[in-house]
Image: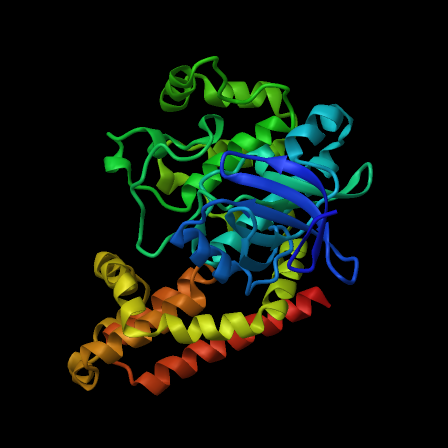
Amino acid sequence: MNVINNYTIHKEIGKGATGKVYHVTDEKNIQYALKVQHHLTESEKKMNEQIKEIKFQNVINTYDQFQYQGIIQCFCVIMDFCNQGDLYEYLNKYRFNLNIQQKQNMLFQIAFGIWEIHQLNIIHRDIKPQNILLQCFDQMNVQLKICDLGLSKLQENQNLNTVNVGTPYYMAPELIDFSQKKGIYDKSVDIWAFGALIYDFFSNYQLFYGLQIYQIFDQIKQAKNLNQKLRETINDPLLLNIAISCLSYEPSKRPDIEQILLELNQPMFQYQQKIFNGQNQRWLQNKNQDLFQPQVQDQFKEQYKNQQKIEYQKANQVNSQIQNQDLSQNQLFNQKSKNHIKNQVRLRCFLSDQALIEQLCIMIEEGNQKDEILKHMNESLRKKLQAKLHQSN
């Protein structure tokens, strides 16, 4: 048996255009998957360095990457090993043996994996059954993990515009249609793919099916009788409603992944969210520190410019007393300080409490003191945390 950097290779378990994957064990006989590639782009190296700092529950964990000089130089990545292949193979065997609860549980795991990826501000862009691996404890008790971040992108700006990426059956309209907002897209492309994936749990055929790629693309762009097709096939009301919302043609009308998880299983989401946060405390602390560096603040500058008027109008309707306050206190804030507090408010509350976000942003606009704003924010978050802990008990 061959040995690479103290990893013993047992057998080949996968092959792709960019390399091969092997089942290996280390010196302690712990099982891993070793991905060997002849070329690794700088973006892939950057991605691997970022994700190996994170402990995932429903995403394949990356533990190490290194170069190895054999007959030719190759790049090696050490990852989780899953013993039962991918979701595509599993559904072909057990699709119609699974009950609704089992399907909901498996889809919850996939959704949580997407949530974990999105926490890193990463868009996967190729969510499909072949990129979801299974660790089976028995025939019906499985853990699902999303793999293959090869097409993933760090969403360093508000959107991306590289189109025609992903697998045709699961590609969102904005990934294949240049005419739709010039191919601009965001994390909602993963939501579309999740909606199409729900259909796979109830049918032997993909939701968008064709012998040629152009036929698949035409179905996606036209989406004729889509909701009717979903209703005829998905026999669970909860999953049906989620699929319909995920497959909204307009990206802005699709739910975010947290909304989906709350619908699927709110207590379980809150529990796994606690685990994720607990296991990744150091990364979260570093992330929060990095997010307030000037170059990162610039990434949110345009977002605040676009939303400032909307937030201010909403605030005028909600709180007429604040509207009449003396705005002269705004002079106490220079622009740098104001942007810093806005970033702190939005990033700590983002996708968590929209009402609190709006209230705090109004306090900023109306010129409240920095200490007063942060005190109000921390007190609100403390009360919310106590309420969640009380519910969990």
The quarter of the picture where residue 323 lies is bottom left
The quarter of the picture where residue 30 lies is bottom right
* Residue, far front: 71
Position of residue 317 measured from the top left corner of the image (x, y, whole percent): 28, 61
Residue visible at 43% across and 58% down in the picture: 46
Q: Is residue 111 above or below residue 216?
A: below
* Residue, far right: 138
**Any part of residue 264 in sight:** no
In screen coordinates, is 121 left or right of 100? Answer: left
**Any part of residue 274 in sight:** yes
Number of numbered tags placed on the structure image: 0
Q: Is residue 72 above or below residue 222?
A: below
| Colouring chosen for the image of the structure | rainbow
Q: In which quarter of the image is the C terminus?
A: bottom right
Position of residue 320 measured from the top left corner of the image (x, y, whole percent): 27, 69
In screen coordinates, is 156 left or right of 144? Answer: left
Position of residue 97 measured from the top left corner of the image (x, y, whole percent): 78, 27
Q: Is residue 375 above or below residue 391?
A: below
The quarter of the picture where residue 206 lies is top right
Position of residue 174 measured from the top left corner of the image (x, y, whole percent): 34, 34
Q: In this view, does 186 lie above or below 215?
A: below
Residue visible at 36% across and 80% down in the picture: 373
Residue visible at 36% across and 23% down in the picture: 221
* Residue, far top: 211
Q: Say which of 35 and 317 sits in front.
A: 35
